Image (spheres, helix red, strand yellow):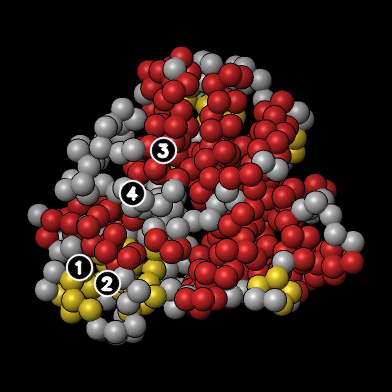
């Protein structure tokens, strides 16, 4: 029997799924004293909490606001509906049309052109037979560059955006509240806002065809967004739209390359591209958990959770709940207990994009980035494989993925 350790223990980061499996079976509503949080680990309970307004997003006031400002994730009621209604058209339906060529162009530039990465400083084209680490050479860069383009920010400043994004991402994953990490995240917000302010001012008088201009012209209940609100939404987009895609690209390729037959199967049958992406999101969601704060006492499975409690909805556990998914701890892109098309519209089969009123606005953009990226790799490098001697090692707790993915292209 597994001794129940803390969520924050080193052993948990090494193998969180053993910990979650134990909790699902023996203590599905578990209070972790070290984390100061109740952990919900079963699929049914996580889904119910997402639906229940008693589980509020008030935690984002300290988890998110210091590095992004007050985002849509903290809003509720009419305010949330108004802001979501203002932003949604840019991320769904015809609003996706401007995104796709930017994604395609960025993928091509990272695969085909001479590029300098912000992480390892390598210069040169990726070519068949080369051995490269795809995390710094591709995964880290793709979503940051795409979103910078969508915001209308200059390519020459991409490295700045990447640095700010890394500092903010570390803040969001800082469950142990390391003060040095907090300071770096807060400094990144101040620097990013100082950088964005003249762009927002310029778009007020000289609008262009970019998302900052849309925000600068947008109205909610008859009033224009303030400069602070414009910068907050832009900052949120830069971070929320980057880290999840970054990690999912890495997870997706690592799962397919773990068994060469998987990569070959998707290469030869592109109808498997979407199932491979959907199964990756179920099996290894990039964000492992979402926080909530209870607004009143609530009881789940006989456990009373007092008002004002911090609750972690453990997506990574719910997505591997044996009560919901057959052979839940196995990556299986052929499984028939998930409707893969539904993975991007918030029906709650798995929770990689959250659920309910706070379901990820950018889910369809992420789908475009993942589909275009995977197809590009399959076309350009049909025989790609893991580098000899390289072992995939997942790291992280709040956000989790391999920190390296060395391949032979």
SS label for mark 1 = strand
The residue that label 2 is drawn on is 38
Residue 390: name its quadrant. Answer: top left
**First-in-chain label (4 vs 3):** 3
**Could you tell me which quadrant the N terminus lies in?**
bottom left
Which residue corresponds to the image point at 62% horizontal and 37% vertical from the top-left?
138
Give residue 341's mark. Answer: 3
Give the foreground label among 4 and 3: 3
In terms of depth relative to the viewer, which is nearer, 11 or 41? 41
Label 2: few (<14), some or many (≥20) within 10 Å? Answer: many
**First-in-chain label (2 vs 3):** 2
SS label for mark 2 = strand
Give the foreground label among 2 and 3: 3
In terms of depth relative to the viewer, which is nearer, 90 or 245? 90
Label 3: few (<14), some or many (≥20) within 10 Å? Answer: few
In the rendered structure, are the residues bearing label 1 and label 2 in contact, judged by CB atoms less than 8 Å apart? yes
In the rendered structure, are the residues bearing label 4 and label 1 in contact, judged by CB atoms less than 8 Å apart? no
**83 shown above or below 326:** below
Label 1: few (<14), some or many (≥20) within 10 Å? Answer: many
Residue 301: name its quadrant. Answer: bottom left
């Amino acid at each position: 029997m597994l001794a129940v350790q803390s969520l924050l223990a080193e052993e948990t980061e090494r193998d969180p799924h053993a910990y979650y499996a134990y909790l699902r079976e023996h203590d599905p509503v578990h209070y972790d004293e070290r984390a100061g949080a109740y952990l919900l680990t079963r699929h049914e309970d996580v889904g119910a909490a997402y639906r229940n307004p008693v589980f509020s997003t008030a935690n984002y006031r300290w988890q998110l606001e210091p590095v992004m400002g007050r985002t849509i994730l903290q809003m509720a009621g009419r305010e949330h509906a108004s802001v979501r209604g203002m932003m949604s058209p840019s991320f769904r339906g015809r609003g996706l049309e401007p995104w796709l060529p930017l994604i395609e162009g960025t993928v091509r530039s990272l695969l085909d052109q001479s590029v300098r990465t912000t992480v390892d400083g390598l210069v040169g084209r990726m070519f068949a037979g080369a051995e490269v680490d795809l995390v710094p050479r591709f995964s880290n860069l793709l979503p940051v560059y795409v979103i910078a383009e969508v915001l209308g920010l200059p390519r020459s400043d991409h490295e700045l955006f990447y640095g700010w994004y890394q500092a903010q991402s570390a803040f969001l994953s800082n469950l142990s509240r390391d003060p040095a990490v907090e300071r770096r995240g807060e400094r990144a917000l101040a620097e990013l806002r100082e950088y964005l302010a003249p762009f927002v001012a310029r778009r007020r008088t000289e609008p262009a065809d970019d998302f900052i201009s849309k925000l600068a012209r947008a109205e909610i209940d008859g009033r224009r967004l303030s400069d602070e609100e414009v910068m907050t939404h832009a900052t949120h987009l830069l971070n929320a739209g980057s880290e999840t895609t970054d990690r999912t690209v890495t997870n997706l390729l690592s799962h397919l390359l773990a068994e060469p037959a998987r990569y070959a199967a998707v290469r030869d049958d592109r109808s498997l591209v979407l199932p491979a992406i959907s199964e990756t999101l179920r099996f290894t969601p990039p964000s492992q958990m979402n926080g909530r704060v209870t607004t009143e006492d609530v009881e789940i499975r006989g456990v009373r959770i007092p008002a004002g409690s911090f609750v972690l909805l453990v997506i990574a556990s719910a997505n591997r709940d044996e009560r919901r998914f057959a052979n839940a701890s196995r990556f299986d892109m052929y499984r028939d207990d998930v409707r893969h098309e539904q993975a991007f519209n918030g029906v709650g089969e798995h929770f990689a994009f959250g659920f309910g009123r706070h379901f990820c606005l950018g889910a369809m953009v992420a789908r475009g980035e993942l589909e275009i990226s995977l197809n590009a790799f399959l076309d350009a490098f049909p025989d790609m494989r893991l580098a000899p001697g390289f072992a995939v090692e997942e790291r992280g707790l709040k956000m989790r993925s391999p920190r390296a993915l060395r391949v032979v292209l």
